[in-house]
Amino acid sequence: MKTITPPPPQQGRTALVTGARRGIGFSIAERLHKDGANVVLLDIDPAETQAAAMKLGSEEGRVMALAADVSDRQAVDEAVRQIMARFGGIDILVNNAGISPKHDGKSATVASMDAEEWQRVISINLTGTFFCSQACLASMKSRKWGRIINMSSQAGRTASTIAGAHYAASKAGILAFSRALAAETGPDGITVNCIAPGRIITPMAAEAGEEANAQYLKRIPVNRLGQPRDISSTVSFLASDDAGFITGATIDVNGGAFMS
Ligand code: NAD
């Protein structure tokens, strides 16, 4: 008897993942590629973004690398134009790019934070999420289907011992932005959800130092730090047809470190 293998779930769809050259973003790009989507890796460094895309291979031309700063509206709009020209649309957007500035492994206090650093964090983490979402809406609306998945943080849900106030404010802002966008775009078949990761082992997490991460581990009931695949598997679900009735939601992926 001949067995028929079903096509991968995201075949024919195009996903844009920001901050995709490393860490959580690269794991998301890898997973959506495995799920069958055309995957666009967007990040700030051209050579490293290209190198990350090469790791996924160029099977059937399903991978594209783009260098852009998500806080630069013109650069984002130009990137989306290039994706439209190559793949004809964008179905899945993962707003993952983010920064969490550290000084000798520590975040600035509110008392010591300079206004330029505050503005930079808000511009990349929050305004970048707005620019990328806005740029992708027309394509999703025209197809009456879309998935926007925004990377918040446990720091946006509760007090953080590691992240700064600018980072926490940007990540809490993403939660409110996502609910507003979910209400606005639900009638167009677009869902908008957030993931709030706890401590995930990536280059960003390493900047806080081993001791901070070891202390953090003591507060995690499942007794391990997170891995990028813990987040990319959640993205894979939220991007799927099975998640079509979930919108405006926040999924905490933190091993139980914070339970709402
Ligand atoms: P990371 O620093 O390893 O990766 C972030 C990526 O974003 C980098 O590749 C970087 O080049 C890119 N980026 C930064 N500024 C950019 C810009 N202006 N335009 C385009 N790309 C830009 O961090 P990560 O740990 O993989 O974090 C990914 C996301 O997950 C971030 O939004 C972060 O805030 C969030 N997060 C991480 C953790 C964690 O413990 N690692 C926890 C909660 C939330």
Image (cartoon, helix red, strand yellow):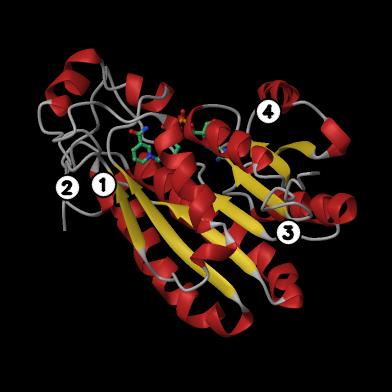
On screen, residue 211 above or below 23: above
Is residue 186 positioned above or below 13 on the image?
below
Q: Which amino acid does label 3 sit on?
A: Ile
Circle 3 residues within 10 Å: few <14, some 14–19, many ≥20: many
Using the image as rendered, state which of residue 130 and residue 96 is in the foreground. 96
- Residue 164 left/right relative to 182: left
Residue 154: numbered disc: 1
Residue picked out by circle 2 = 258
Assign the N terminus to one quadrant of the image. top right
Residue underneath mark 3 = 90
- State how many labels appear: 4
**Distance between the alpha carbons at the discs numbered 2 and 1:** 7 Å
Residue at image location 75% in from the left, 49% down from the top: 79
Marks 2 and 1, the one that precedes in the sequence: 1
Q: Could you tell me which secondary element the residue under label 3 belongs to?
A: loop
- Depth check: give the residue in front, 85 or 243: 243
Q: Name the residue under label 4.
A: 49
The local secondary structure at tag 4 comes to helix
Q: Left or right of 215: which side holds 192? A: right
Front residue of 98 and 3: 3
Q: Is residue 184 above or below residue 165?
A: below
Most distant residue in the bottom direction: 187
Ligand 1: does it lie within 8 Å of the C-beta at label 2? no
Front-most of residues 144 and 109: 144
State which quarter of the image contains the C terminus: bottom left
Q: Is mark 2 on a helix, strand or loop?
A: loop
Discs 2, 1 touching: Cβ within 8 Å: yes
| CA–CA distance in space, label 1 to label 3 | 28 Å
Q: Mark 1 or mark 4, which is nearer the start of the sequence? A: 4
